Amino acid sequence: MDSWLLWNLTQGRSHATDATNASRTMIYNIHNGDWDSELLELFNIPRSLLPEVKDCNANYGSTSLLGSDIAILGIAGDQHAATLGQACFAKGMMKSTYGTGCFALLNTGDTAVASSNRLLTTIAYQLDGKTTYALEGSIFIAGAAVQWLRDGLGIIDSAKQSGQLAAEADDSQQVYMIPAFTGLGAPWWDADARGALIGLTRGTGPAEISRAALESVCYQTLDLLKAMQADWSQSEDTVLRVDGGMVASDWTMQRLADILQAQVDRPVIAETTALGAAWLAGSGAGLWPDQAGFAQSWKLEKNFAPQMAVEERDSKVAGWDKAVRRVLS
């Protein structure tokens, strides 16, 4: 899509893409930074058809379609741009985007860590000829669980209500929602798993179900974090930077910090994908600061530190683990 947009914006003068989007095609070798000859042969794809692969902050030409000649100074994939927007430039930094699904990336620096725990090894970004790698985990259902509460069950009128209801839930009830509406993503990768509500009693109502839906996102993030820590020991003291629509809920972010037993940082600018893309263009044009300056300009809106007792948290997590095992196909 990006190379098609670029081709049209430049009226056929530039046929290119960046390393992050190239890595998503499954025919790009992320280790040597080139289209993979073996895979091209396997799929019978002529190399001459493929776009030139550049840095995320490369000069991609210019467009005159908007009334004047405007330089195109950056391209990045969705989650990669969010990683840039969160200024996750240092090795060990982690961001998680909570939209319909959830995508977490852990910066592993110049090392492409091969996962033994069913995570993806990917390019985080490529700037000025230097490739930075990441471990990535994908959750299929995050905000979509709240949408289901609203549109499917009709127990809330707006997404904001879910956090308000969750805060009113009976703490003595341990209700778990496994939102495997389309299967389970990382680290399970079980496309045949299906969703379940476990632990229901006669006292279970909209508040308990809302809490279970929001907590399911927290537990799934913990599953990703544990897999990342198992793959890369340097990730043990993780601070998670969050963005996306769900992070507006203070209740959800506090429960996320409690379940992870880690610090969760919410930035002032939550639309970090757009911010990352804008930074690529702005820094390339000399209008915004360089990498170090941009990192310093990142502003914290609110920090969430763990408040739940470790014993209570561990009991909740054990219940989640049992619930997941019940829905695996």
Image (cartoon, rainbow, N blue to C red):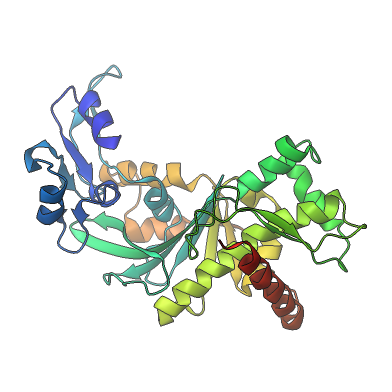
Along the horizontal axis of the image, is 232 left or right of 167? left
> Quarter of the image holding residue 214?
bottom right
Q: Is residue 239 above or below residue 52?
A: below
Which residue lies at the image location 44% right of the left edge and 68% below the top edge? 93
Q: Residue furthest front?
A: 329
Image location of residue 233, percent across then percent down: 42, 82
Seen from the viewer's position, the closer of residues 153 and 190 is 190
Image location of residue 237, percent across then percent down: 51, 79
Which residue lies at the image location 25% right of the left edge and 30% below the top edge? 4
Seen from the viewer's position, the closer of residues 52 and 206 is 206
Residue 305 in view in this figure: no
Image location of residue 298, percent across then percent down: 48, 56
Q: Residue furthest top?
A: 67
Q: Is residue 143 above or below residue 1?
A: below
Residue 275 in view in this figure: yes
Q: Is residue 233 above or below residue 99?
A: below
Q: Is residue 208 above or below residue 53?
A: below
Q: Which quarter shows the N terminus?
A: top left
Which residue lies at the image location 77% right of the left edge and 40% below the top edge? 153
Along the horizontal axis of the image, is 36 left or right of 208? left
> Quarter of the image holding residue 111?
bottom left
Seen from the viewer's position, the closer of residues 274 and 26 is 26
> Quarter of the image holding residue 306?
bottom right
Image location of residue 256, percent across then percent down: 65, 64
Q: How many marks?
A: 0
Which residue lies at the image location 62% right of the left edge and 61% below the top edge? 327
Q: Which quarter shows the C terminus?
A: bottom right
